[in-house]
């Protein structure tokens, strides 16, 4: 074959293959297009159905919401209608009541008018009778009505002046007494809070030794031992020329007791050096703390008081080492507790609460914290902090009138505290001070004119004054007792109270011969 024929055949075959491939490709494209179209239609139908379903659900939700709102509004409308109906009924009842009240008021008004008319008639009649009586009195007394009024006014004025002057004097006396009492109380409490104890007896302990050679061992080389003792105990050791005695000075009685026992153990043992001193002081402190806690527990058991907190129990034990005016604080608190229980039983009150409040009333005096509050208020706060009942806390805080008394228990505590402190012999004092106080009482009475003799009796709790009958009248005697008691309150310091008795006696003596 010729080349031309081959080329033409090849081209014809290519053309035929191309046409056939185009036809096949076109058929495939149409088939894919139909598949895509069918899928799109199916997807569209699905989306359409889904949207329709969502629209139906939304419609149902909106319908339910609308129905619920309609129901809620209907309920509100019904409630308002019921309320309006009730108010209407109440208004009707109120109108009926007002009508009834109006009728009653009209009747009462008529009665009152009748009574007023009758009273008016009686008043006119009484005025006529009064006028007749005035005319009759003017005839009898030969004094006009105006003169009688003037005389009566003058008499009433004089009586009012006398009464007012008496009341003014009483008010002034009461104000002076209260001012002096408050001033003394503030000064005494300030001294007690700053110095703990105001007397030398209660701030100093004496440690007796067999011979003065021990003093050198206590002092130690270059004073190391005594400095170690003072640093460990917080107590000042005074080693002077006092024979066979070492003075321990400190305001805290517990510290003094620790120092005394430590020194006794060191002197007995014979080993006195700084390391041994610190060891002994630690042991003695621990022993004292245990003893304090044991004393507090034993005191509570003896008094039948239960459920006392540990800190309060420890403070009760510390009372053993504290004294006030020479009176042991623990013994004083036990006395007050027993007195309170007895008085509460007589009055029909809770004896356990009274005994508990009596034991804790001075707990503020042995508090570990430094505070500017009076011991009564400090004790009340301590009791509140440890869960004591409000009536007990009020009794503790009010037993010196720092706060208002709110329970019947408070005055009982105050009275029993005064009874325990005023008991003869409860609060000891030095003999010299006691004798001097009696002399001052007698000399103070002799300074007044007309006083001849004065006698201080009942351990200084009563002062009897003899006056001249020609120089002092009965009224002057009354005034003398008041003035003398005021001078004693202002110028002297004494426990309890002093009774002043002025005796005026007139003797007429004649001799028959």
Image: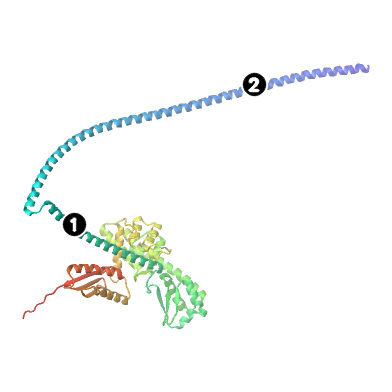
Q: Say which element carries label 1.
A: helix
Circle 2 sits on which residue?
Answer: 41
Residue visible at 33% across and 56% down in the picture: 391
Residue 507 visible here: yes
Q: Secondary structure at mark 2?
A: helix
Residue 287, image x and y in percent? 44, 69
Q: CA distance from mark 1 to mark 2?
A: 122 Å
Q: Residue furthest right?
A: 2
Picture colour scheme: rainbow
Quadrant of image for the C terminus? bottom left
Q: Which residue is mark 1?
A: 157
Q: Where 502 falls versus 108 (above or below)?
A: below
Q: Position of residue 309 (x, y in %)?
A: 40, 60
Residue in the foreground of this view, choosing between 123 and 423:
123
Mark identifier at residue 282: none
Q: Nearer the viewer, residue 456 or 122?
A: 122
Q: Name the spot of residue 125 as percent of width and height, x first.
A: 10, 43
- Residue sitting at 28 percent across and 66 percent down? 419
* Residue 163 as seen in the image, left or right of residue 387: left
Q: Which residue shows up at 52% across the image and 79% down it?
A: 222
Mark earlier in primary sequence (1, 2): 2
Q: Is residue 339 visible?
A: no
Q: Nearer the viewer, residue 275 or 128?
A: 128
Badge 2: residue crowd in 10 Å (few <14, some 14–19, many ≥20): few
Of badges 1 and 2, the one in the foreground is 1
Q: Position of residue 378 (x, y in %)?
A: 39, 61
Quarter of the view holding residue 292: bottom left
Q: Is residue 115 above or below residue 270?
A: above
């Amino acid at each position: 074959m010729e080349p031309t024929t081959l080329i033409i055949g090849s081209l014809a075959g290519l053309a035929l293959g191309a046409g056939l491939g185009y036809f096949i490709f076109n058929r495939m494209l149409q088939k894919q297009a139909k598949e895509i179209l069918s899928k799109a239609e199916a997807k569209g139908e699905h989306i359409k159905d889904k949207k329709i379903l969502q629209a139906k659900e939304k419609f149902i939700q909106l319908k339910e919401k609308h129905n619920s709102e309609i129901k809620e509004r209907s309920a509100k409308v019904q409630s308002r209608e019921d309320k309006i109906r009730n108010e209407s009924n109440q208004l009707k009842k109120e109108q009926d009541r007002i009508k009834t009240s109006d009728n009653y008021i009209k009747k009462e008004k008529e009665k009152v008018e009748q009574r007023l008319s009758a009273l008016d008639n009686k008043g006119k009649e009484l005025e006529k009778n009064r006028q007749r009586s005035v005319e009759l009195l003017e005839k009898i007394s030969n004094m006009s009505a105006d003169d009688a009024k003037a005389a009566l006014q003058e008499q009433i004025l004089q009586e009012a002046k006398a009464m007012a002057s008496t009341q003014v004097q009483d008010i002034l006396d009461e104000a002076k007494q209260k001012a002096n009492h408050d001033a003394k109380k503030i000064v005494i409490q300030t001294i007690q809070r700053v110095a703990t104890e105001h007397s030398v007896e209660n701030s100093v302990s004496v440690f007796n030794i067999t011979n003065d050679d021990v003093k050198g061992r206590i002092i130690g080389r270059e004073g190391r031992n005594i400095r170690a003792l003072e640093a460990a105990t917080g107590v000042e050791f005074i080693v002077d020329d006092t024979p066979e005695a070492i003075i321990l000075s400190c305001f805290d009685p517990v510290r003094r007791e620790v120092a005394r026992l430590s020194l006794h153990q060191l002197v007995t043992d014979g080993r006195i050096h700084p390391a041994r001193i610190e060891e002994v002081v630690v042991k003695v402190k621990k022993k004292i703390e245990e003893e304090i806690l044991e004393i507090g527990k034993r005191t509570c058991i003896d008094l039948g008081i239960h459920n006392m907190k540990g800190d309060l129990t420890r403070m009760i034990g510390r009372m053993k080492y504290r004294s006030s005016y020479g009176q042991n604080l623990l013994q004083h608190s036990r006395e007050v507790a027993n007195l309170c229980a007895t008085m509460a039983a007589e009055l029909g009150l809770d004896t356990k609460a009274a005994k508990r409040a009596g034991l804790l009333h001075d707990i503020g005096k042995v508090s570990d914290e430094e505070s500017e509050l009076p011991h009564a208020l400090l004790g009340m706060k301590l009791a509140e902090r440890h869960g004591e009942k409000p009536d007990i806390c009020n009794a503790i805080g009010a037993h010196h009138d720092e706060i208002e008394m709110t329970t019947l228990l408070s005055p009982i505590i105050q009275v029993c505290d005064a009874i325990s402190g005023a008991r003869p012999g409860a609060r000891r004092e030095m003999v010299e001070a006691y004798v001097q106080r009696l002399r001052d009482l007698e000399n103070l009475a002799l300074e007044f004119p007309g006083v001849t003799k004065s006698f201080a009796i009942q351990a200084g709790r009563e002062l009897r004054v003899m006056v001249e009958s020609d120089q002092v009248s009965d009224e002057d005697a009354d005034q003398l007792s008041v003035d003398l008691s005021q001078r004693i309150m202002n110028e002297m310091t004494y426990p309890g109270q002093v009774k002043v008795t002025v005796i005026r006696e007139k003797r007429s003596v004649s001799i028959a011969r």
